[in-house]
Image (cartoon, rainbow, N blue to C red):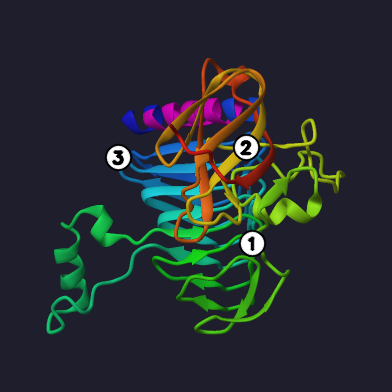
Amino acid sequence: MLKPLLRALYWFLFNACRAWGAMRGVRIEPSVQWRGRARFSVGHGSYIGARTVLSGDAGASVQIGERVWMGSDCEISALGRVDIGAHTTLQHRSQLHGDVRLGAGCTGAADLYISSGRHEFRRNPPLPIRLQDRARAGLPAAERSQPVEVGDDCWLGIGVAVMPGVRIGRGCVLGAHSVVTTDLPPYSIAVGSPARVIGQRLAYAPPAALDAARDEHLPYFDAGFSQIGHDEGDAGVPRVAGGLALNRAECRIALAVLPGQGVRLQLRAAGPGQLLHAGVVRSVPAGLATLEWQAAPDARGLLSFDWRPEGGAASACLVLLSAQAITLEEQP
């Protein structure tokens, strides 16, 4: 008696979830499994293929952006956070484990494997590996996981493996069965095990000024910007008033700034909010605005910004029109 009741309850909840997903343009195959107590988020227009498993313990999260396509028999397991950017495609049997950030507009071929963790075999070599793993399980997550980041617009060929702690720059192409053990600079073409750089997609040289209306500057709007339209028939970059709209709260640009220089942004906001750079907050009014900061590039030379809109989603749109390196005036 109890089993039929539980089965009926399961199918009721499952179909309710499918109906909710359909209203949001999300397609999830009936055989998809959701395990654990992680936070799961699936963006509008996304598809998750048959027998795919998504899992994570309490406190972890799996974030799937808009119009992501995920093939059958994939496995996504979050130790901290797994984040898949908008318009990214993962073919059959792809696996992402631990703390993985996969950028927007990426193309992943079948059997892609990315993990931020590895088995322990050096901590106490005489012990069996599984016993060493058990001892390591009690350590803080930060000591068990080395986050992996793959930039926007990357193509990872069939059977590619990306090792813990690796950062792959925007625009890279990885040949079939490559094993990536070290960081790759933006727009690299790499092959082999371990992967080595054999070429470049373009001569990557961030300028001192960026114009969002120019296609040749798109590589330097590194992450967090909508550069792919929702209409599959549109081959052009979607621009708003000549600028690039943010598709997430965090964005990054590659700009040539000298030590001591500042950065000036010209942007347009649908509503008021705050924009942060290196912990410094600037108020953003609705409409056109120009803001300046002391530039604080990271180790890769990227400038990161965090957009915090006021009000609801209607006021969330922020469009970056241009950026430039400047000499800041001396303060009295």
Q: Is residue 208 visible?
A: yes
Which residue reaches farthest front?
332
Q: Nearer the viewer, residue 9 or 283?
A: 283
Q: Are the two marked residues, 1 and 2, in contact with CB atoms closer than 8 angstroms?
A: no
Identity of the residue drawn at 42% across and 42% down: 278
The part of the chain drawn in magenta is 6-19
Choose mark 1 or mark 3, whichever is in front: 1
Majority secondary structure in the magenta region:
helix
- Residue 63 within the magenta-colored segment of the rendering: no
Q: Are the two marked residues, 1 and 3, in contact with CB atoms closer than 8 angstroms?
A: no
Q: Which residue is mark 2?
A: 265
Which residue reaches farthest top?
311
Give the residue type that dot 3 points to: Ala
Q: Which residue is mark 1?
A: 154
- From the viewer's perspective, is residue 137 above or below residue 67? below
Q: Nearer the viewer, residue 194 or 204?
A: 204
Element at badge 2? Answer: strand
Give the residue type that dot 1 points to: Cys
Give the residue type that dot 2 points to: Leu
Q: Which residue is mark 3?
A: 58
